[in-house]
Amino acid sequence: MSQSKIVTIERHIIEGERAHPGATGDFSGLLRDLTLAFKVIWREVSKAGLVNILGLTGKKNVHGEEVKKLDEFADDTIYRAMDHGGHLCVMASEENEDVLQIPDNYPTGKYVLIYDPLDGSSNIDALVTIGTIFSIYRRVTPKGKGMLQDCLQPGYKQIAAGYCVYGSSTMLVYTTGDGTHGFTFDPSIGEFLLSHENIKIPRRGKIYSVNEGNYRWWHDGMKKYVKYLQEEDKETKRPYSARYIGSMVADVHRTLLYGGIFMYPGDTKNPNGKLRLMYEANPMSFIVEQAGGRSSNGHKRILDLQPESLHQRTPLFIGSEEDVCIAEEFLQGKRESARAS
Ligand code: AHG
Ligand code: MN
Ligand code: MN
């Protein structure tokens, strides 16, 4: 008989909270509400190919309801799942310019939720893997409704982060600072079950992931680093393979499991790259660091960056410890080729 125990995400969260004396259960309530939102989003994402049959965006569906674009739907679903629980004082979503307030008629709590409702949304129509990313902080203002300053905290202050990838299977990966754990969704029972306990990213991988179409705008260090990855060397298993899905959540998920590096660098056209610090880089960095990996903007640890605005962008180099270290050496001009100078 198989020895592995069946653990739902709910049980895992509650047991994790029990390890902290004085915990009120507030936090596990928050994560439980989020899990419900992921199930609702999963249900709609799984029907993406049916939009032409069930109704196009902007039209009415078979129930006579407006059919929303999936990223708007996901944004709405998370807000509606989270606004009334009494756990949060404010939210911020990649889809909205300003912070999202808790409605007047609901209680406010001590946590802050920051989320990217659907990452990789340009891939939806091709049925490519996409996902939801979230990040949780403790509020810094004393009480009542939360404010921008509750959201603009550096990544090392996160108390939890996670993502749900909607792929050939759906999986929720999260950390509360006590390792990174993965749960696979079993649609037949509607539960996320522990499938990847204490994920450890390999110290070095053999895959690199970057949009090489931007090569002409890359800085010198970046060009040299990618050339280095493409050179042959048996000892360091080069050349690396290239994989780029174009959904950061899926590219980082693969990197977490197989090792290697995912990059979205700054370049001469976009000095800060494309990815957003608060919604994408911070949560993924917390998750990858908790799995033993590394994440940086090429010069500094992502989690140490002090955010100045909600939607600010940052270059991102994330993955296996050794791979990210070597990338940093190239980007900082400390290395020009296979051998350190
Ligand atoms: P989003 O769908 O939330 O706007 O994010 C898209 C991001 C990210 O998922 C992905 O890594 C990146 O855009 C891809 O950008 P390029 O097309 O420039 O490679
Ligand atoms: Mn995104
Ligand atoms: Mn998005």
Image: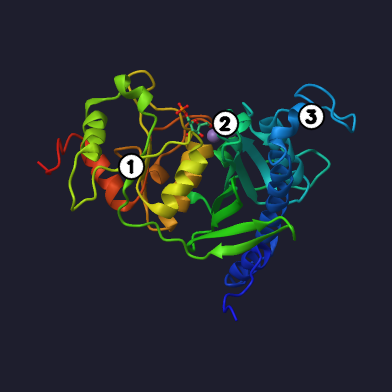
Q: Which residue is rendered at x = 75% and y = 51% of the image?
A: 86
Q: Amino acid under label 2?
A: Asn
Residue under label 3, please give it.
53
- Decide: few, some or many residues near mark 2? Use Cα within 10 Å; few <14, some 14-19, many ≥20: some
Q: Are marks 3 and 1 in contact (CB under 8 Å)?
A: no
Q: In this view, does 164 lie above or below 25?
A: above
Q: In this view, does 158 lie above or below 54?
A: below
Quadrant position of ligand 3: top right
Report if the beta carbon of the residue with label 2 is closer than 8 angstroms to ligand 1.
yes
Q: Distance between the residues labelled 1 and 2?
A: 22 Å
Q: Is residue 224 above or below residue 235?
A: above
Q: Which residue is rendered at x = 59% and y = 68% of the image?
A: 16
Q: Residue 241 carries which label?
A: 1
Tell me: 76 left or right of 245: right
Tell me: 63 left or right of 216: right
- On the image, the x and y values in percent for residue 26 come to 69, 59
Local secondary structure at mark 3: helix
Q: Which mark is residue 331?
A: none
Q: Which residue is rendered at x = 50% and y = 46% of the image?
A: 283
Residue under label 2, please give it.
123
Q: Which of 92 and 340 is in front in this view?
A: 340
Residue 305 occupies quadrant: top left
